[in-house]
Image: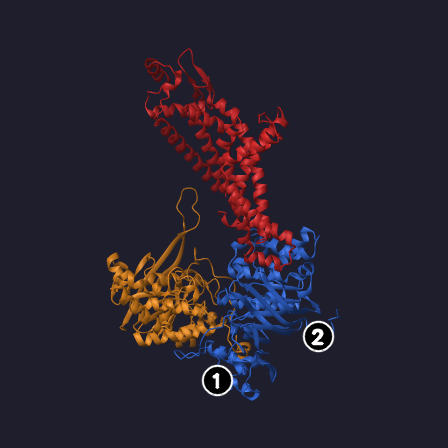
Amino acid sequence: MLYFVIRRTAFAAVLLLVISAFTFWIFSALPADPAALTCGKNCRPEVIEANRERLGYDRPILEQYGSYMKGIFAGRDYGEEGASIHCSAPSLGYSYDRHECVTTLIAKTLPVTASLAFGAFVLWMFIGIGLGTMAALKRGRWPDRLATGFSVIGVSLPTFFLGLIFTMVFIIWTGLLPFPQYAGITENPGKWFSSLILPWFVLAIVSAATYVRMTRNGMLEVMNEEFVRLGIAKGLPRRRLIVKYVMRAALIPIVTIAGLDFAFLLGGALVTESIFNLPGLGKLTLAAVVNSDLPILVATTLVAAVFIVVANAVVDVLYGYLDPRVRVK
Amino acid sequence: MTADLILEARQLRKYFPTGASKMLQRPTDVVQAVDDVSFGLRRGSTLAVVGESGCGKSTLGRLLARLIEPTAGTVILDGVDVTAARPKELLALRREIQVVFQDPYACLNPRHSIGQSIGTPIRIQGTMNKTDEKARVRELMALVGLNPEHYNRFPHEFSGGQRQRAGIARALALQPKVIVADEPVSALDVSIQSQILNLMESLQQDFGLSYVFIAHDLAVVRHIADEVAVMYLGKIVETGDTNTVYGSPRHPYTRALLSAVPEPDPKASSRRQRIVLQGDVPSPVNPPSGCRFRTRCPKAQDLCAQVEPPLVDHSGGHLVACHFPD
Amino acid sequence: MTDANTIGSPLLSVRDLQVTFGTREGDVRAVQGVSFDVRAGETVGIVGESGSGKSVTANSLMRLNFGADVKITGQVLLEGRDILAMSEEEVRSIRGRDVAMIFQDPLTALNPFYTVGSQIAEAYEIHHPGTPKKQLREIALDSLAKVGIPEPKKRIDQYPHEFSGGMRQRIVIAIALVNSPKLLIADEPTTALDVTVQAQILELIAAMQSEHGSAVILITHDLGVVAEITRRVMVMYAGKVVESASVDDVFATPTHPYTVGLLRSVKSLETQRHSRLEAIPGTPPSLINLPKGCPFHPRCAHAASLGGRCNADEPALQQIGRSETRCHLDAQTLARLGEVRA
């Protein structure tokens, strides 16, 4: 097992390296000119050229990449001698548009996204697995049809649509909730909660829809297995049978997929954060796209990739732990 | 052997690498599925290969039909070395040797009509036009006892026995010389088994077919085979004329196998001395040294662990691989 | 409820069991009016081919028939109590304790996510709640040793996929017997196993039976297995019991044409090579559209000799010697039915 973990980690590290190189290269190949963004709208070409040279954008790609990677581990200075800004490690770049170290920006926005992702995750697991289990146990009857109907609708609703509908209903029409304004959970828990509750549900409903179906189908499949029949033949009470036998088997693939979905969400829920005015990674990324702020884009892409790669590795190991058959001897 | 052999296997081996790979190394364990197997099939006769699960008989069947490539050794079909054949030659060779599989439910494409399935080999070979092909398929269906008017029906509309008949019809489509039948009746009910075995025998008579009949059911084999080869962990441990092997088995495994078959006669059953082998079949990954059967053999001695017993002819074609045969 | 411990009354009494499955194509009448008794400690075999209803009958004894649309009628009396009339709670308390089952495929019967020790312990703990963990472990170890698993201390914490097919079947048997049930139902227990392992398992079942004193109902299609360990046999065809006899009688003097056909198509080690095998012509009937009258008549060689009776009336039960059979033929013909055997 240990070999497996070590190998998996090493593989993940190599993968991240490849991803960073690829990301860097792709962004450098974009038509947007990073040097042109350094000095605002009415910029004279000479200034742009000077900036390009000063900031190192005229260096060969490989060298730029090298400096970038070094910056991640050792921090880096941006700007020219005397007027440079130091971003301490891990330095993911410097946004000239906002005049801030990217790492700082990410550090500010990540907790918001994390709050959003985590809450949505808990909600969708409850709703998805709960409804899916109910649907499987009452197959063919109205709870099943209800849950399946919900699943179909939820999958078809785009997040922005649901977000706007919720905003209309809960904030504008009924006034049940205030306009969302995010506050950190330590500063103002009430505000934190009220700003997140709607986006949580928006994300959760859309995701839960898939999990309802997965859970339902997974459980129905397992219920037909011989070992479940043996469990019944042993005289197992119904609840124990469902939890210990059926769910234990059916939930393994679902839990592992959920881990990946969660990691994906950590990279930023662009649409939802924008609609609900949450200052998270998603909103940051969206703004960067609009402004062609390349340093931020490179960084957020990389950060999202890190989450996914790490989640993949964790999920692989977790699967081996949950399913004895998969364990490498 | 001067007999007229339609099919010959010489020192066939098939090894599968397996096991977990540690760190960056390649997998080190090797499953010796078929290890140094040689035999000959006489024209127009039936050779049965029997053994329990893991003995390699199915792998052997696939090697003979060249569905998988041998790790070493040769297969000679009617004088031609099949293993050395190039892909173009292989297509022609496939006409000579066909396969019937065990599971009549899994062997027919559920989306093709029965007629289409049976005609598939003909289409692949490209030897006939559509009309001729249909006619030939109808002819084959009648031959195996299916109603030719059911050409357009689908597999799920047929019973297990009928599907197996279709599988046989398909195997006959190209007029092969040899048919490798891998457990063709195991999945069928007892009364249907007899029908299929009767069919296979009459087809053999009418068309001069030669069969390699792979099975685990010793009673079925007794009935249909002229010669039998008993396999254990990838090796042939005993082979010879069916009457001889069944009447006077000389390898301890063969004896145990025969004594384990439940006899459908309560009086004989209670009288019989049964040899019950201890333990399970060892893993084919790292087979025991020397004689592979020694871990379960009631007669095992030191020599058995050191030296692998060769197949020795004891009398008139009855070969046994044992240091201390009965 | 009568006291069923009086000498002479059977352990299990099945009366007119009928099981019908509703499907889109129509009602599948899997079991139609099966009745039989099993005495304590007896070994009874139920023989039949696919579609005969033997497995459905076995499942009904523990109410293991599932499906959206299942109708079961009749009585299944275990020591006088009707299992079919019990509440869910009561049936659950019987399953695994008074009646236990061994399934056909050991590869899929065990829960892959729990150790074998915990699965055996669970079987005990369900009916003895509150048993301390240490004691449960002892019981599991003991069970493993009794069914012949080598090195039980090491293997008790292993998972099912680490065992071979034969070993897994032993574990399934251990689970079934841990509560010393009065009745053991073995549904094709050796069909998925190699011949040499089959021999071991049959021996084990017989040994365990004498140790626990359980009655055994053995479901199989293999007449050899039946001859090995059963005392009494019921032959089923298309949902009905067509013959019921002692094992010696059923082989020596079968009294139903289907039984005769079955015996003739069985191959044994004594079969002559290349002899023409007897085969029952045709195929078993559809359970949705059963033939009228006797279900076997379309394939029966004797149907012609009885005018139209066979496809008009269902045959009544006849007693021929010590056997019972359902056939329209007269008693004399039936008594000599098997005589034409090779």
Which residue is disc 1 drawn over? C304
Q: Amino acid at mark 1?
A: Ala
The hue in which chain C appears in the rendered picture of the protein: blue
The hue in which chain A appears in the rendered picture of the protein: red
Which chain shows up in orange? B
Residue A26 position, x and y percent, is 36, 30
Task: Using the rendered image, report if marks 1 and 2 lie on a common chain.
Answer: yes
Instruction: Locate residue B117 relative to residue A300 in the image: left or right.
Output: left
Q: Earlier in the sequence, mark 1 or mark 2?
A: 2
Specify few, some or many for label 2: CA neighbours under 10 Å numbering under 14, 14-19, or 20 or more. Answer: some
Q: Chain of mark 1?
A: C
Q: CA distance from mark 1 to mark 2?
A: 41 Å
Specify few, some or many for label 1: CA neighbours under 10 Å numbering under 14, 14-19, or 20 or more. Answer: few
Nearer to me, A110 or B158: B158
Q: Amino acid at mark 2?
A: Ser
Q: In the image, is residue A132 above or below residue A261?
A: below
Q: Chain of mark 2?
A: C
